[in-house]
Image (cartoon, helix red, strand yellow):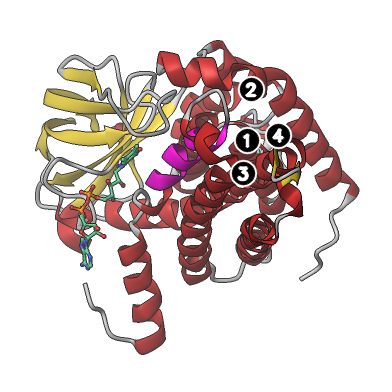
Amino acid sequence: MNLELSEEQTAVRRLARDFVDREIAPNVVEWDRAEEVDRALVKKLGEVGFLGLTIDEEYGGSGGDHLAYCLVTEELGRGDSSVRGIVSVSLGLVAKTIAARGSEEQRRRWLPGLTAGELVGCFGLTEPGTGSDAGNLSTRAVRDGGDYVVNGTKMFITNGTWADVVLLFARSTDAPGHKGVSAFLVPTDTPGLTRRTIHGKLGLRGQATAELVLEDVRVPASAMLGEEGKGFSVAMAALAKGRMSVAAGCVGLARAALDAAVRYAGEREQFGKSIAHHQLVQELISDIAVDVDAARLLTWRVADLIDRGQPFAVESSKAKLFASEAAVRAANNALQVFGGYGYIDEYPAGKLLRDARVMTLYEGTSQIQKLLIGRALTGVSAF
Ligand code: FAD
């Protein structure tokens, strides 16, 4: 793979860097404390094209390849993982799935608004009783004439209270396909759908994470995305690409940890010299730097495979596994460089560590990524 960026990729990265420094960095501490990112930011993300990357212009997208998408995602992750996650879900899991698997009518209905940042999407797979074992979900969609009537509860849904549409996975009646799960595009103002914000998160506090309760929610059959009973493969395909996006965000988070640690090591003096002079501090910093580079290379490989139309799911699991664990290590090492100051939120390391921690949990925990990689290598499913 060619590691040199094209002019277009370099330009989009510069655009993302400037955007993050101007619109995100100055507000990060305030949003984290208030437990809410300023929602006006979503429209701004749409205006610069970051919510339409890889989507055709015909549907309001801004085009670009998956490497460009990773470059932007890395910058957003450097700025604020809450913002990065809003984009990874609304564009990465929802809009990209509609573009890839939706009907022409669904594309025309949802994509222009999602790519412009006028609408927000969320991805409703996890339930209170099923997380890693997502295929075992129990939300039901029962056919009733030309409609489906949906009942169930979805848990930990990123963008949940902000979203205008939920890409919802439910077990539909008499579905002939794999495990009988179908995907639906459900407007969140549909009667019977209620949402509750989940407060008290360790990190990603700026994000609107919610529980969605569906009580006799009636959706037309035309809201089904893809074929009946094939919804689990829709979810898995979305997550395979989504893991690359999480990995790119982790690279950005680790880079933020590196920048902060290097800066602080040059400023802070102990034993009569800046702590950058102490070899064990340099070890902490160099460990972060190696993690950043290794995670980025794994992530770019996934983008390259996608852009060349090659299989990428296992490589995406490897990138997500490594990058998420690396992000936790990087933030933890940065916190160590900051000493006691790392423990208070006037300095960035603590928030980076809180935000990093969830990356090893969502879109498949580290254990689940290992099982996916192990299955591909051995041919044996250990699920
Ligand atoms: P469990 O599945 O109960 O796992 C608990 C532990 O058991 C973990 O360590 C796990 O690795 C381990 N484990 C489970 N099965 C195995 C096995 N077979 N072998 C070895 N170990 C195993 N979901 C969505 O659908 N949409 C979202 O937008 C979304 N956003 C999220 C945002 C946040 C902030 C959080 C915290 C979660 C979000 N999730 C979302 C849910 C997330 O994907 C799940 O939390 C995750 O898949 C793990 O499921 P669980 O929490 O039920 O843990």
Location of mark 2 (residue): 24
Mark 2: which amino acid?
Ile
56 up-or-down from 366: above or below: above
Question: Dot 1, crowdedness within 10 Å: few (<14), some or many (≥20)?
Answer: many
Give the number of the mark in front: 3 or 4. 3
Q: Are marks 1 and 2 in contact (CB under 8 Å)?
A: yes
Asked if the beta carbon under badge 2 is closer than 8 A to the nearest atom of ligand 1, the reply is no
Task: Look at the picture and state if 178 lies above or below 54.
Answer: below
Give the CA separation, mark 3 to mark 4: 30 Å
Disc count in the image?
Answer: 4
Q: Tell me if mark 3 has few (under 14), some (14-19) or many (20+) residues whose alpha carbon lies within 10 angstroms of its own.
A: many
Marks 2/3: CA distance? Answer: 16 Å
Whichever of callouts 1 and 4 sits on the residue coming sooner in the sequence is 4
Quarter occupied by the N terminus: bottom right
> Which residue shows up at 67% across the image and 47% down it?
258
Q: Which mark is on residue 62? A: 4
Amino acid marked by disc 3:
Ala
Tag 4: amino acid: Ser
Circles 1, 4 touching at the beta carbon (< 8 Å): no
Residue picked out by circle 1: 76
Q: Which image quarter is the C terminus in? A: bottom left
**Magenta stretch, overall SS:** helix
* Badge 2 density bin: few <14, some 14–19, many ≥20, Cα 10 Å: many
**In what element is the residue under mark 2?**
helix
Instruction: Measure the C-alpha gap from mark 1 to mark 4.
Output: 17 Å
